[in-house]
Image (spheres, coloured by chain):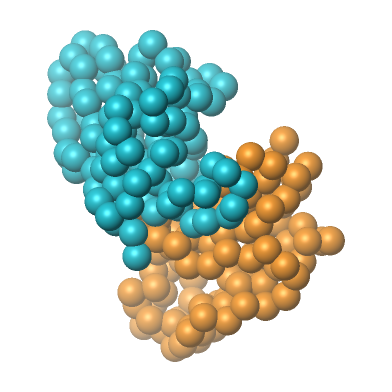
Chain colours: A orange, B cyan
């Protein structure tokens, strides 16, 4: 089976940096996704990590440590529009991702 | 990027009626589509995997006779919620991946915009 854990809610200030952590347990591992989901909308793809290390993509970066069962999403230069839910999703043996409950990020001025 | 559409975006119905939701891949052929359900402040829960030309694969705890899935073509999958009840009120999201997702090559899924169902 799979288990994914991420904080329920985080708050941060506009212009700051925030790190959203995700820990997981799984019997099989193919990769780890991060998605952004605004209220009432479908998720949009942010990143996919297969190998250990940090992958940077503009203001967003994602890190993976397979040995520790740990990933984080790093958001820099926060903007108000970054207020959303961030979903960590694990791709295990079936290649169909299992989603975590999501972390609701609130960015305030 | 690839586009997936869903119709309708909103539906309100009376208890006991059936509701059909369509999921279309607009610019690619999808042999596999996925149906998710999401309750407020909850995670996306996979309901079933829709396979073109064959029966859908349902996740444990999902009633196949209540949630009918038809994947009649490479660009269209439908989910019919039969005899809907208030507890079926939820956000239903479909997704599709380019060819290769089910074949072992990891590709990202493209999500439809979702359908919000309210059963009165």
A19 relative position to A29: left or right: left
| Residue visible at 25% across and 51% down in the picture | B26
| Residue visible at 54% across and 62% down in the picture | A34
| Total numbered circles | 0
A84 relative position to A88: left or right: left
> The C terminus of chain B is located in which quarter?
top left
Q: Residue furthest right?
A: A67
| Residue visible at 44% across and 82% down in the picture | A78
Residue A38 showing in the rendered view: no
The vertical placement of B28 against B89, above or below, is: below
Q: Residue A54: x, y in percent?
A: 67, 78
The vertical placement of A82 against B106, above or below, is: below
Q: Quadrant of residue A62?
A: bottom right
B3 relative position to B50: left or right: left
Q: Residue B83: x, y in percent?
A: 26, 12
| Residue visible at 68% across and 53% down in the picture | A30
Q: Quadrant of residue A64?
A: bottom right
Residue nearest the observer in this picture, B104 or B13: B104
A31 relative position to A65: left or right: left
Q: Residue A70: x, y in percent?
A: 73, 62
Q: Quadrant of residue B85?
A: top left
> The N terminus of chain B is located in which quarter?
bottom left
Residue B70 showing in the rendered view: yes
Q: Residue B40: x, y in percent?
A: 39, 42
């Amino acid at each position: 089976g799979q288990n994914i854990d991420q904080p329920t809610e985080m708050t941060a200030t506009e212009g700051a940096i925030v790190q959203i952590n995700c820990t997981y347990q799984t019997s099989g591992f193919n990769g780890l996704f991060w998605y952004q989901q605004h209220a009432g909308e479908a998720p949009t793809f942010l990143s996919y990590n297969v190998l250990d290390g940090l992958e940077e993509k503009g203001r967003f970066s994602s890190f993976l440590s397979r040995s520790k069962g740990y990933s984080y999403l790093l958001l820099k230069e926060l903007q108000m529009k970054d207020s959303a839910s961030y979903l960590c999703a694990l791709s295990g043996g079936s290649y169909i991702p299992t989603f975590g409950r999501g972390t609701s990020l609130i960015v305030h001025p | 990027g690839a586009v997936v559409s869903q119709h309708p975006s909103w539906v309100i119905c009376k208890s006991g009626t059936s509701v059909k939701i369509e999921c279309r891949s607009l610019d690619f052929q999808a042999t596999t589509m996925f149906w998710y359900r999401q309750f407020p402040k909850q995670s996306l829960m996979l309901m079933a995997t829709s396979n073109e030309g064959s029966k859908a694969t349902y996740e444990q705890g999902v009633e196949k006779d209540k949630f009918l899935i038809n994947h009649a073509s490479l660009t269209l999958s439908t989910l019919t919620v039969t005899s809907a009840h208030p507890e079926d009120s939820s956000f239903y999201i479909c997704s599709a991946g380019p060819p290769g997702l089910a074949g072992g090559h990891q590709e990202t899924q493209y999500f439809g915009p979702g359908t919000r169902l309210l059963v009165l």
